[in-house]
Image (cartoon, grey):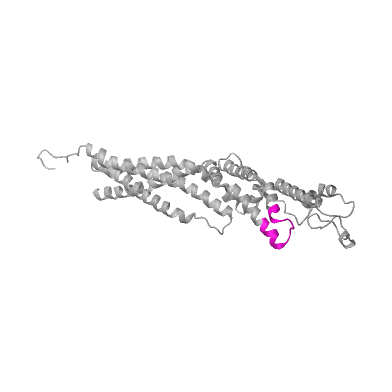
Amino acid sequence: MHVLKNILTAITALLLHLTLPLLVIASIFTLLFTTPDTIKQSFREADVYQAFVDTIAHELTAQTQTDGSSDIPQKEMRNAIEQAVTAEDVQTQAEQAIDGVYDWLNGTTEQPEFMIDFGPARERFAEEIAMFAAERLQSLPTCTSLDQLQGEIDPLTTECLPPGFDPIEKTSTYADELLASDDFIPDVQISSTELLDDIEDDDQISTIPEGFEWLMRSIWIISTAIVVLALGLFALAPSKQVGVRRVGMQFFIAGLWLGLSTLIVWILQDGLFKENAAAAEIQNALARAGELLVGDILLIMAVGAGIYVLLGLSLRYGLAPRLKAEEPAVDKTGRA
């Protein structure tokens, strides 16, 4: 019987030791990821949306200058892109997508519902190019030779205008011509329906909201398990004083391990999220967003470690000494 009791005590102590860190993990999920607010805030603070615009402007400008697909000067090209694709529009569409995913996870919708549409930005970009073309045409001289009059008038490449040519009339329809051209930037639309159609395992996707619901309940399930295990460890002890000490030591040790893990991750996070000068701005912005999220996680871990250590010390050195040690039972002959 004594051996069995020792085995149960060891198993209960081990389970309690393993369950305590799980409560902190569940707290991290509950406090940070049960709503989209934390993700949205980290993206805003890290300037992810502006970085996306800067990256698009840089890549598209560099591409057109490299392959010669555009005769627009680099400065004007970048300005046109930045006027067409704004950080505010990108943020609005991204946050709508995040909300759509969370609505699905919370069971509000049967599947994620969102649409990322760059059609309006494409139209604004064409209008910016047309405005540049209009200014360019109005500054050109009149053609003076027959060679210059041959060929179609391209507002971005022509060096002179035929006599009687109306720049305003040409540029009034130039944006529509660009939008209809196969060589212009393609119209990009990304819908949740299209993304889901590309996923073959629909059954696995359909179980994600159920798993998300269990994760939201996990903090209460784990809290209950900790209480039961702590009471079990206390009940298996030979005395109340020993029981309180054992429970206190489990909390104290769990707090130390949690604090050490927090310190290690805190030391390593600078290297993990170090910005790379050669990387695109969007990559560095996402790294900053990740660093912000990790900072919030480390804060919760540090608080959890502190609570465990203080609670463990209070039980071990505060409450336990106040409990009178129980004397072993004796028979009538005075033997224990």
Q: Quadrant of residue 151?
A: bottom right
Quarter of the C terminus within the rendering: top left
Magenta stretch: give its range.
Answer: 60-77
Question: Residue lying furthest left in this view?
Answer: 333
Query: Is 7 placed left or right of 198 in the picture?
Result: left
User: 231 or 257: nearer the eye?
Assistant: 257
Q: Is residue 65 magenta?
A: yes
Where is residue 186? Give x, y as percent: 72, 53
**Residue under the image location 86 percent in, 60 percent down:** 148
Task: Tell me where residue 302 sits by quadrant.
Answer: top left
> Could you tell me residue 267's position as x and y percent?
41, 53
Judged by its main secondary structure, the magenta piece is helix
User: Do we see residue 111 in this rendering?
Assistant: no
> Quick check: 65 left or right of 39?
right
Residue 111 point in image, percent of width and height = 61, 44
Q: Nearer the viewer, residue 330 or 84?
A: 84
| Residue drawn at point x = 69 percent, y = 56 percent | 74
How many labels, in total? 0
Q: Is residue 264 above or below residue 238?
A: below
The reply to whether residue 141 is visible in this rendering is yes
Taking the magenta stretch, the answer to whether it contains residue 287 is no
Q: Nearer the viewer, residue 10 or 128?
A: 128
